[in-house]
Image: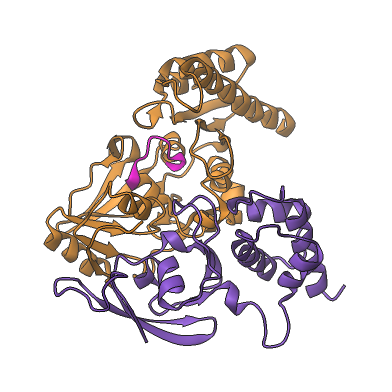
Chain colours: A orange, B purple
């Protein structure tokens, strides 16, 4: 399979890339890891006239803590880089749990977190993780840059709110005010398949109770689902069996699964419930051990 | 120098954009004039006639087309050939020395790590990247590393043994 014809540019700076996108007038696409875009182009679901490859721009492959304590992930930070990051393991349990579950090890060498957010696949894992963590995307365009909360960044299946001449230059995860805990669970038929169901849980604990919570769902709706009611049900109290069961029920209600070859809607809803319980039980167990 | 446009015509149509790329392929500098839409797998197979890189699913699933791109495994059906400009690519043809097999190739031979052989080049290159990074992997680590490469014959048992055999050999055991 070949993509349809396009003009290819590999600029060396972000400014140059933005100018090219502007020139492309809505018919240009940014190529980062390419692990979703190139397959889409081969299938002719996407046929951009101009491809702006940002892989030759230096300084976009980073994961670092800023002076504000927030975690900044550059546009060319590959999944494999996140998977191997010991900093994530110690400070961002939800991200650390998700990184090894993205696609397969070979795809992880190319694909990027920011690209995954931009691609906005309802079955993309990172969007749920970043929604659960309350993160945002920094977009840069000819007029400067702006921060867009991830929950608003994705506007529908395979759609984001970037202007045609904007590039998502990094994702930002705000600093935790309490002690961060959580994880990501994904049901897949085999390695590399899309999620049948994925659940991201990210909480912060202060003084024995939950001070902040985020729960987001992958693959059970037309886009990533922010299970706000489920998260809110956890805040302001310690985790106990009833509260965990209640949050799991609310998350299962928030899911909008459809029956398909990966399973029935009822089955997927049950998996959401089960995963929320498992993840929160782990958080509760780790608090018990620490206490 | 190799040119590669539509396979039916030796010259590009006048409106076809063409780029010259220069890459280090199996240790040698190579150049090609290509259309940007050409995939790396096709440049390797049809352009450079290195047919050891197999194209299996063509949909980023099977890993048969895996090559090392700057030392890391990538699926060459999902990388544009123009992206290799200025980079290093290693294919299965670059594994063996002039007179002897690479230890990973020896391992696949000794432990019967292949039946039909279709997935083998991709398996071996993924294994090479693993052993370059981790010379003493556990069986679990080998299985994890190979989980993006599909084999439809062997049930993976002997492939894993082959990689562990090669790891031991490379460590001088």
- What residue is rendered at 65% in x and 24% in y? A281
Which quadrant would the C terminus of chain B be assigned to in this image? Answer: bottom right
Q: State the residue lying farthest toward the right.
A: B173
Q: Nearer the viewer, residue A133 or B33?
A: B33
Is residue A100 part of the magenta span, yes or no? Answer: no
The answer to whether residue A208 is visible is: no
Tell me if residue A227 comes above or below residue B115 in the rendering: above
Q: Is residue A273 left or right of residue B2?
A: right
Q: Splitting the image into 4 quarters, where does residue B146 fall?
A: bottom right
Q: Nearer the viewer, residue A249 or A205?
A: A249
User: Where is residue A247 drawn, in percent x and y?
Assistant: 51, 17
- What residue is rendered at 44% in x and 24% in y? A260
Q: Which residues are magenta?
A: A118-126
Q: State the residue lying farthest toward the front.
A: B8
User: Where is residue B164 drawn, in percent x and y?
Assistant: 78, 62
Which quadrant would the N terminus of chain B be assigned to in this image? Answer: bottom left
The answer to whether residue A140 is visible is: yes
User: Where is residue A141 drawn, in percent x and y?
Assistant: 19, 57
Q: Nearer the viewer, residue A105 or B5?
A: B5
Is residue A124 part of the magenta span, yes or no? Answer: yes
- What residue is rendered at 52% in x and 32% in y? A203
User: Where is residue A89 drawn, in percent x and y?
Assistant: 61, 49
Q: How many marks?
A: 0
């Amino acid at each position: 399979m070949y993509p349809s014809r396009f003009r290819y540019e590999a600029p060396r700076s972000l400014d140059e890339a933005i100018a090219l996108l502007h020139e492309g007038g809505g018919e240009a696409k940014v190529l980062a890891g390419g692990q979703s875009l190139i397959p889409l182009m081969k299938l002719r679901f996407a046929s951009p006239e101009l491809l702006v490859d940002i892989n030759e721009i230096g300084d976009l492959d980073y994961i670092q803590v800023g002076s504000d304590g927030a975690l900044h992930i550059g546009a060319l930070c590959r999944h494999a880089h996140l998977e191997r990051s010991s900093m994530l393991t110690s400070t961002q349990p939800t991200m650390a749990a998700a990184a090894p579950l993205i696609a397969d090890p070979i795809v992880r060498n190319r694909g990027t977190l920011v690209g995954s957010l931009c691609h906005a696949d309802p079955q993309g894992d990172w969007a749920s993780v970043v929604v659960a963590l309350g993160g945002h995307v920094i977009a840069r365009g000819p007029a400067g840059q702006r921060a867009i909360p991830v929950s608003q960044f994705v506007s529908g299946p395979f759609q984001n709110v970037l202007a045609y001449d904007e590039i998502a230059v990094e994702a930002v995860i705000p600093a935790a005010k309490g002690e961060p805990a959580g994880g990501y669970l994904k049901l897949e038929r085999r390695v590399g398949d899309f999620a049948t169901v994925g659940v991201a849980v990210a909480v912060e604990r202060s003084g024995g109770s939950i001070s902040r919570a985020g729960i987001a769902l992958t693959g059970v709706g037309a886009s990533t689902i922010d299970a706000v009611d489920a998260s809110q049900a956890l805040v302001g109290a310690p985790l106990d069996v009833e509260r965990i069961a209640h949050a799991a029920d609310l998350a299962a209600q928030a899911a909008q699964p459809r029956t398909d070859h990966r399973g029935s809607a009822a089955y997927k809803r049950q998996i959401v419930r089960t995963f929320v319980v498992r993840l929160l039980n782990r958080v509760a167990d780790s608090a018990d051990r620490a206490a | 120098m190799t040119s590669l446009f539509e396979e039916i015509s030796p010259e590009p149509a006048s409106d076809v954009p063409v780029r010259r790329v220069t890459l280090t392929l199996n240790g040698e500098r190579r150049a090609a004039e290509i259309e940007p839409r050409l995939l790396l797998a096709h440049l390797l197979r049809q352009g450079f006639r290195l047919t050891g890189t197999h194209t299996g699913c063509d949909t980023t699933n099977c890993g048969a087309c895996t090559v090392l791109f700057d030392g890391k495994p990538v699926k060459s059906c999902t990388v544009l050939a123009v992206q290799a400009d200025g980079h290093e690519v290693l294919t299965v043809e670059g594994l063996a020395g002039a007179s002897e097999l690479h230890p990973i190739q020896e391992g696949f031979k000794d432990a019967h790590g292949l039946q039909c052989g279709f997935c083998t080049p991709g398996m071996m290159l993924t294994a090479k990247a693993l052993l370059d990074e981790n010379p003493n992997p556990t069986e679990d680590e080998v299985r994890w590393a190979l989980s993006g490469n599909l084999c439809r014959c062997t049930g993976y048992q002997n492939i894993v043994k082959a990689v562990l055999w090669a790891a031991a050999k490379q460590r001088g055991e």
